[in-house]
Image (tube, grey):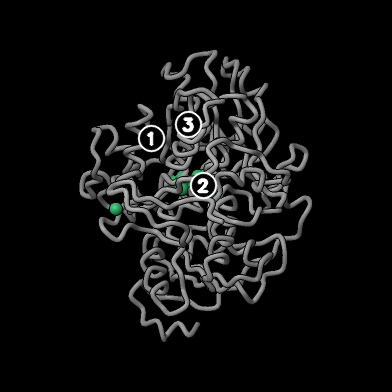
């Protein structure tokens, strides 16, 4: 029994139910067309509630999932009457059990499940830290092999709330390589027999897993929010929120107005912000991110520094911004740190650096009059609760099994 049909957003070609990342005709993004057009919540404790719109057969039983609550203290401080926080992280007092502390875990469960259901054996991915941790965690829980390539700066972020298992293969890159170098090496590894690339934004299981943040918000609020705030590096979260809102719109019970995407990057690395200021579909490297590596090193939240984001591709972030009349922000380190302190003291939970950037963009939006007092706002705190987690769990560093000099290293040399 099929549950969805994969369709190309450009040429309309249909692929049915497979683990597939691109259209053979035109390399465009695919989207899952679910046979369930109304969202029927399942009786599961976490992300499995949203099974209607996840591209898998079996329901996910994990207690990890997005939560949404109405802000009081921060809302009062900002003079907003309908500010909702979407929180993906660890905060048991609020029912939040994402133990790797970011919404990457919401992508990892359905992706690993789809891999299993389509006969895949091992998945390969590049990570600046949070994605690797999420997939490693799900690998530890399910035993499915993952190969994770991280730049040196990301290795310390590769911890787990349980003992690492043999199924986790961590490949560290020497200093001087950045996240995009990790992507390039992972791309080569993924061509080896038996390996499947995780695919980033191209993977519908990742997008629809992340999209559950929007679904959960709509369930809590009773309608699609007017505005959606998130910090972006690849923009996948923004695309996912947009697609989830499109499905809610079609469902019909949550209103028919799409949320305005209000997305942030951190200075001095803001390629999508620069391109969007000029309403350009193409990111022009010389213009939008010259001296990229140096800029990336200077950013506060390095998780937000993808040099090849799915921005211009059909169905990518540019299309999402156009469709929702979106806004992008460029946030400084000082603004992010200030917003972090404010958020943490008022809301009572620690947040990760990219979420500080998201919170800073909300402050900027209020100051610039981009939202009005009574509108419904969803602030996606996509990562948090790391300090809270450490009160309850001992954390284990994942040991690298190999070190790669550069993205072109001979794969035999890695000996993995
Ligand atoms: C990955 C990540 C982001 C950026 O996500 P996109 O893929 O660009 O949407 C933002 N916040 C946190 C906590 C993240 O882990
Ligand atoms: Zn196509």
Is residue 315 visible from the viewing direction of this image?
yes
Which element carries disc 3, helix, strand or loop? Answer: helix
- Disc 1 marks which residue? 330
Q: CA distance from mark 2 to mark 1?
A: 26 Å
* Direction from residue 2 to residue 48 in the image, left or right: right
Residue at figure coordinates x 55%, y 78% from the top left? 401
- Counting from the top left corner in percent of width and height, residue 243 is at 45, 39
Q: Is mark 1 within 8 Å of ligand 1?
A: no
For residue 261, what is the image quadrant? top left
- Disc 3 marks which residue? 250
Quadrant in which the N terminus appears: bottom right
Nearer to us: label 2 or label 3: 3
Residue at figure coordinates x 59%, y 50% from the top left? 106
Q: Is residue 283 above or below residue 39?
A: below
* Direction from residue 319 to residue 398 in the image, left or right: right
Instruction: Give residue 208's mark.
Output: 2
Mark toward the start of the polypeptide (3 vs 1): 3
Q: CA distance from mark 2 to mark 3?
A: 16 Å
């Amino acid at each position: 029994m099929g549950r969805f049909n994969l369709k190309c957003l450009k040429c309309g070609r249909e692929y049915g139910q497979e683990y597939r990342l691109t259209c053979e005709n035109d390399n465009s993004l695919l989207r899952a067309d679910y046979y369930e057009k109304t969202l029927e919540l399942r009786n599961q404790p976490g992300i499995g509630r949203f099974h209607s719109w996840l591209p898998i057969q079996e329901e996910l039983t994990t207690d990890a999932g997005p939560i949404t609550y109405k802000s009081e203290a921060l809302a009062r401080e900002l003079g907003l009457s309908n500010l909702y926080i979407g929180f993906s992280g660890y905060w048991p007092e609020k029912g939040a059990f994402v133990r790797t502390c970011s919404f990457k875990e919401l992508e990892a469960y359905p992706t690993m499940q789809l891999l299993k259901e389509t006969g895949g054996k091992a998945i390969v991915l590049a990570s600046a830290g949070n994605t690797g941790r999420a997939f490693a965690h799900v690998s530890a829980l399910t035993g499915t092999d993952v190969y994770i390539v991280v730049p040196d700066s990301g290795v310390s972020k590769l911890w787990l709330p349980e003992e690492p298992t043999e199924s986790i293969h961590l490949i560290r890159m020497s200093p001087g390589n950045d996240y995009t170098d990790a992507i390039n090496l992972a791309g080569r590894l993924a061509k080896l027999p038996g390996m499947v690339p995780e695919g980033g934004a191209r993977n519908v299981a990742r997008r629809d897993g992340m999209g559950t943040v929007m679904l959960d918000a709509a369930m809590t609020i009773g309608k699609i929010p007017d505005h959606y705030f998130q910090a972006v590096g690849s923009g996948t979260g923004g695309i996912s929120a947009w697609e989830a809102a499109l499905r809610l719109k079609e469902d019909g019970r949550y209103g028919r107005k799409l949320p305005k995407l209000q997305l942030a990057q951190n200075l001095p690395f803001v390629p999508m912000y620069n391109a969007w200021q000029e309403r350009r579909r193409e990111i022009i490297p010389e213009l939008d991110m010259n001296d990229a590596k140096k800029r990336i090193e200077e950013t506060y939240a390095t998780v937000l520094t993808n040099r090849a984001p799915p921005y211009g591709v059909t169905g990518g972030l540019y299309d999402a911004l156009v469709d929702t009349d979106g806004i992008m922000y460029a946030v400084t380190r000082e603004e992010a740190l200030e917003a972090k302190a404010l958020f943490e003291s008022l809301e009572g939970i620690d947040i990760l650096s990219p979420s500080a950037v998201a919170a800073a963009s909300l402050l900027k939006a209020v100051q610039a009059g981009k939202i009005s007092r009574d509108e419904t706002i969803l602030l996606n705190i996509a990562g948090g609760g790391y300090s809270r987690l450490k009160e309850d769990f001992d954390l284990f560093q994942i040991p690298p099994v190999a070190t790669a000099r550069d993205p072109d290293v001979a794969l035999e040399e890695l000996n993995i």
